[in-house]
Image (cartoon, helix red, strand yellow):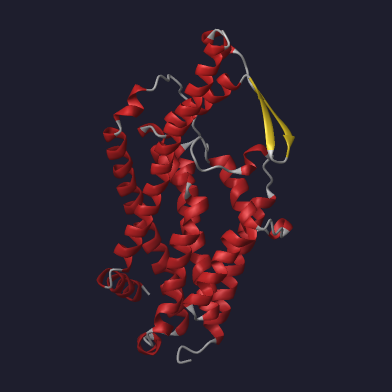
Amino acid sequence: MIRFIKMELRHAMKSKIVVKFIIVATVLFSMILLMNFAAVNSTHSDFQTQVKFAKENGEDINVELKKEYKVTEQSSNSTHIENPLSFYKELLDKSIFASSNEYRLTQIFESSIVLFPIVFGVLGIFNATYDYRFKTIKLKAVNVNRKTLATGKRLTSWLISIVILVVSISLAWLVGWAINSYLQQLHTFNTTVSLPLRDMGLKVAWTVFLAIFYCELGYTIGYITKNSSISIIAIFIVSYIMPMLNFNLGYFDINKAILAISAQVFDYYGVIQNEFIIHPFSFYSIATLVFYALLMVIVNKTIASNRSNFE
């Protein structure tokens, strides 16, 4: 088993699969950070508009900023904000804090709910379908039995996922640091906010779990179909199209389960938002993920036991 995993890892390195996914992940993480920096400028502009409006109406800026704001939904498409000056000041503080060095790592972790199906789901699909696509499954089957082959490829996918995650996050953090250092305008905004942050260890553990989970999900879909194109379409439908259409699977909704748990782990001060922040946490979410994790293990083992490597 160990020998086979080492062989798969060497193949992944030589074929530059890992490098390609690191580049993709780094670019996507960096785009999220750039969106954060853009949000600072946009929110600052909105805040300055409110300051100008308050001055024109003879209002005391310092007094207005100390007042609490209230947001009321008037309809599905409109809201009413009482004391918008205070509201936009809080938004500005959050935007600047989300773009800080202190929050950058958390912001990258938070993007997992959006980006991981693209990166690690597709990685799992690629690893599951590669040997069928390039007809190398028969060559590998000569050296190892089908159960070892299937288990080894899954474990290899997990290890590669962790490597890609660590390296791409490190590179994206450096990109964010460089942008923060270059954009001196961020340092001229007047804010002294220091927002509470949840436990970093839990964030790291949950992010690693999500990377492996999506990789396993992609691998399972790819292992079933043996076709990368069909599998990629399937994971996009499950991860993006179904939530967009508000397709509700109840207790079996994997996307809502992930969002619900993520809402308890991450802070969401930046551009990535989670609607489940305002909903109470349910242990059904954990049960849902455990159910799917066990289901994927059972499906993969069943296929490995019954499918011939020479198909």
Q: Position of residue 155 (x, y in %)?
A: 42, 68
Q: Is residue 194 above or below residue 209?
A: above
Of the 4 image quadrants, the one containing the N terminus is: bottom left
Front residue of this view, candidates 243 and 146: 243
Identify the residue at horizontal 35%, vertical 89% (top origin). Answer: 139
Identify the residue at horizontal 55%, vertical 81% (top origin). Answer: 303
Front residue of this view, candidates 115 and 161: 115
Left or right, 123 with reference to 82: left
Q: Is residue 20 above or below residue 192?
A: below
Left or right, 73 with reference to 110: right
Q: Is residue 308 above or below residue 99?
A: below
Q: Position of residue 26 (x, y in %)?
A: 35, 53
Identify the residue at horizontal 57%, vertical 59% (top origin). Answer: 240
Report if residue 195 is visible in the image: no
Q: Quadrant of residue 299?
A: bottom right
Q: Is residue 231 above or below residue 144?
A: above
Identify the residue at horizontal 43%, vertical 19% (top origin). Answer: 192
